[in-house]
Image: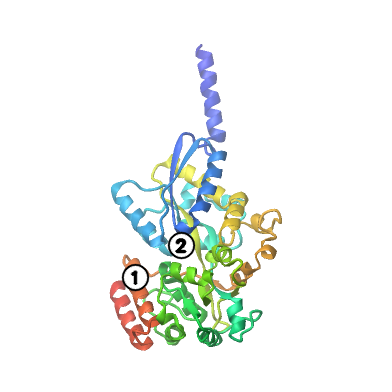
Amino acid sequence: MRSIAIIAALTAAIYGCCYGEARTEDVSLRISAAPSIYQATYKKITEEFQKRHPDIKVDLLPPVREDEELLQNTLRSAMTGELPDVLFISPNVMRPLIGRKIAVKLETVGANMQALTNLDLIAGATGVGTVDDTLYGIPFGVSVPIVVYNADLVAKAGGSPEQFPTTWPETIELITKISALEGSLGGFMEYDNTGNWTYKALVATLGGRMMSPDGKQIEFDDAQGQEAFKILQAFGQAGQARADMTRDQARQAFAAGSMGVLITSSGALPALEKQAAGKFSLRAAPLPLGGPEGRIPAAGTVLMITARNEQTKKAAWEFIKFAVGADAQTIMGNNTGLLSVNKTALQDPNRLGNQQEARPNQRAAIAELSRLTEWYAFPGDNSVKITDIIKRYLQAVLTLNRQPEEALASMKKDVGALLK
């Protein structure tokens, strides 16, 4: 009996040595995700992971509308000791989680060079989740701001649906003409996005920056920043001022056929295409550039680990590897407007390889990949407050309640106070 016990113990030890890191038995994962528009996709992926890993129980928490809300929920959970284990969250709000040591360094759970190579990610993908040279997140999918337009209204206003304007002045001229059509709103610039994304994109297209590279000086009030606010004012003058809406309401108005041009996210494309089907011809175009120095800030979703228990961390890493693998990325690519980060999923014609032919509007987003830049996040503990303050100024200019020069000066003062 003693010999049998010894053999059993040795067998267990050998099995644990060879397979222990690959198996995570009797582990539960609590996953919290934003934005809520992708909740159905998150659900499909977690269910598929559960099938392949029956030893890991996955609990996808109720949907969260915005990334800032998920950030605040997570910060509160850290205080009560009820943190989720994995987050689907915007790269724009990673810093507060890192600063409070809530985010787990992925190198500590197995994200070494070989493991990252095995993920088969597109070039530069890990840069999205890297902060101060440390990897905290793996991108799940990438989105970019784009222009979607009602080709019927563009043609009716004298424009060319096949050759959408490539500059902001030409775009403003077109939406002004569309606004002159009876019952039509020329255009709408979404301004209430997470992290002021479309506003930061507008500044970036003009070659501007939010702050200096060292993070010490505000630069959004320079010539490019002033031009950005004048473009916002022009959108207001072309009709947006008389129809101030949330972005959800604006997307509904566009899908109904009453709006000519919408500056939105590539992630919103599938839903808009579905809603507009049979009503009008929907087209998409890249964001206009102010010059060769113009860039587009990348957004989307990154996967982060916030688990405290070591065994749970390993299970979380298994989930992340699955979520960025070819199968899960195919689910994501077929059900959202996010661009896949997995090379096999993108290239395989049986996965997403033929998607550009099937969904030509996605080309507008793909065309921007060569000019991506960071989605800037303001440093410090007041980043969310800064986002809210900027949003109020954007609304004030778009509704023509404040002049660009005065609003920009006041915004710089208010943001500067929160950066101290």
Query: Label 2 crowding class (10 Å Cα cut-off): few <14, some 14-19, many 20+?
Result: many
Residue at 55% in and 85% down: 174
**Of labels 1 and 2, the one closer to you:** 1
Measured as percent of width and height from the top left, residue 336 is found at 56, 59
Q: Which residue is mark 1?
A: 388
Up the image or down, 256 lies above or below 155; here it is above
| In the displayed structure image, the side of residue 131 where residue 290 appears, left or right | right
Q: Quadrant of the rendered structure where residue 223 is?
A: bottom left
| Disc 1, SS | helix
Which badge, 1 or 2, comes first in the chain's sequence? 2
- Measured Cα–Cα span from mark 1 to mark 2: 18 Å
Residue 362 showing in the rendered view: yes
Task: Establish if 257 lies above or below 172.
Answer: above
Mark 1 nearby-residue class (10 Å; few <14, some 14–19, many ≥20): some
Direction from residue 209 to residue 148 in the image, left or right: right
Q: Position of residue 294 (x, y in %)?
A: 54, 80
User: Which secondary structure lies at badge 2?
Assistant: helix
Task: Determine the image quadrant of residue 292.
Answer: bottom right
What residue is shown with label 2? Answer: 91
Residue 302 percent coordinates (x, y): 49, 58
Side of 93 where 275 appears, left or right: right
- Expressed as whole percent of the image width and height from the top left, the position of residue 37 reads 48, 58
Name the one closer to the observer, 115 or 153. 153
Most foreground residue, 231 or 278: 278
Residue 211 appears in which quarter of the rendering? bottom left
Amino acid carrying mark 1 in the image: Asp
Disc assigned to residue 402? none
Marks 1 and 2 close (CB-CB < 8 Å): no
Q: In the rendered structure, which amino acid carries the disc numbered 2?
A: Pro
- The answer to whether residue 51 is above or below residue 127 is above
